[in-house]
Amino acid sequence: MMIYLDHSATTPVDEAQKELILKLMYTDFGNPSSLHRLGVNSEKYIKKSRTQISKALNVNEKEILFTSGGTEANNFAIQGAVPKSKKGRIITSVFEHPSVLNCVEEMSKKGFDAYYVKVNTEGILDLDEFKSALNPETVLVTMMHVNNEIGTIQPIEEIGEIIHNYNRANNTKIVYHVDAVQSFGKIRLDVKKSYIDLMSFSAHKINGLKGSGGLYVREGISLIPLVYGGGQEKGLRPGTENIYGIASIGAATEGAFKDLEKHLEHVKILKSKMIEYLQENCDDFEVNGSIGDRVSPYILNVSFRGIKGEVLLHTLEMNSIYVSTGSACSSKKKSYSHVLKAMFHEDERLDGAIRISFSKQNTVEEILKASEIICKEVKALRSIIKRR
Ligand SMILES: Cc1ncc(COP(=O)(O)O)c(C=O)c1O
């Protein structure tokens, strides 16, 4: 039995989308820009997806921009929303996804003043430091909702309120971007109440196709395109639309938001069963990232002391259990995770970390089986190390 526990890296596409995608490939395959019937048919899928996403987020259809995924959406928000003058402060946090951190770094090379807010040992952003980082030169704040490696939920609403009040008091126009790739369709976030201007999301984290995502762009926020071409997506994102990805993200969003609470309850049970099992049967391990309601039930990051996370990952793989050491994007790099390093510095704890990420598809039976094998393999690896 294969037990897939790497859903924060990606998810399988919902079976229900098979028919939809095949139809778009072989029947409704027209170019959405074509004026004839086939083109008009294709365009309907784009409209439908925009409606599905805007309904889920409770925003206007005009405020949804399709992209090739979370990475492009983040780049769009950061590069597209700041003034061309190449001046001003961009505030982010030390443990963002590389698609934010590397983009902000590039912006700082161009002349922007990048400020990285620290996080505490629990993996939660320091709000006091954030408040003091705001200054009249600030042009953009970019923060993630759920951290992709440890699952901690950042105070997005509070940050939004702080920015809103700051803008009102100082007559500034700081734009607020949220990377919601790991929370979209999983943990509710009120876009309006949080005063969010831009918000990134991605299809393949919620059982949609890879290479498809989007950016919520609040009405009134103007963006500069990253590429130039025809008039698709109001000229902001030209090029013939990825109709499969767009239809897929709409369907995936509708499904994820409809049963969001049900799925959340389900994964809560899965995660607590695994923690319970580990606590009873495995010693010398630590959960990385705050436990309780400030962490997503979809992600569990654990360090097993004395062993290497990567060795454990491959040992589990031999048992057909798939987990991750950090985020999929950084796991091939041979250095410690920048997320964990932002929280603590003990080599043994950094070395022994694995990320287990759950989904609505996992069963309690799978979790108990996986927990049993994890404990067994951790013990076996430790006894090999002891004998050396
Ligand atoms: C928090 C976060 N932001 C952005 C991304 C990038 O999304 P995509 O894979 O769609 O480019 C990821 C992907 O893992 C992520 O976890």
Image (cartoon, grey):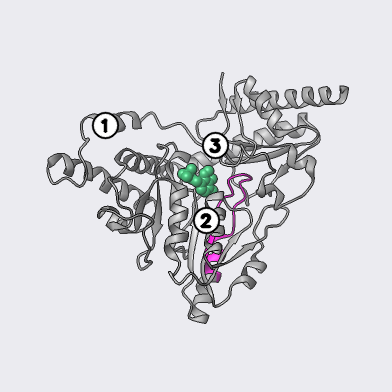
| Residue placed under numbered mark 1 in the picture | 25
* Percent of width and height locating residue 176: 49, 64
Q: Can residue 252 be spotted in the picture?
A: yes
Residue 146 drawn in magenta:
yes
Between 178 and 329, the residue placed more toward the observer is 329
- In terms of image quadrants, where is residue 104? bottom right
Q: Which of marks 1 and 3 is in front?
A: 1
- The amino acid pointed to by label 3 is His
| Residue placed under numbered mark 2 in the picture | 103
Task: State which tag comes first along the sequence, 1 or 3.
Answer: 1
- The amino acid pointed to by label 1 is Met
Residue 342 drawn in magenta:
no
Quadrant showing the C terminus: top right
- The amino acid pointed to by label 2 is Cys
**Residue at figure coordinates x 38%, y 66% from the top left:** 221
Q: Which of marks 2 and 3 is in front?
A: 2
* Percent of width and height locating residue 159: 56, 65
For the residues labelled 2 and 1, the Cα–Cα distance comes to 34 Å
**Residue at figure coordinates x 64%, y 56% from the top left:** 94
- In terms of image quadrants, where is residue 90? bottom right
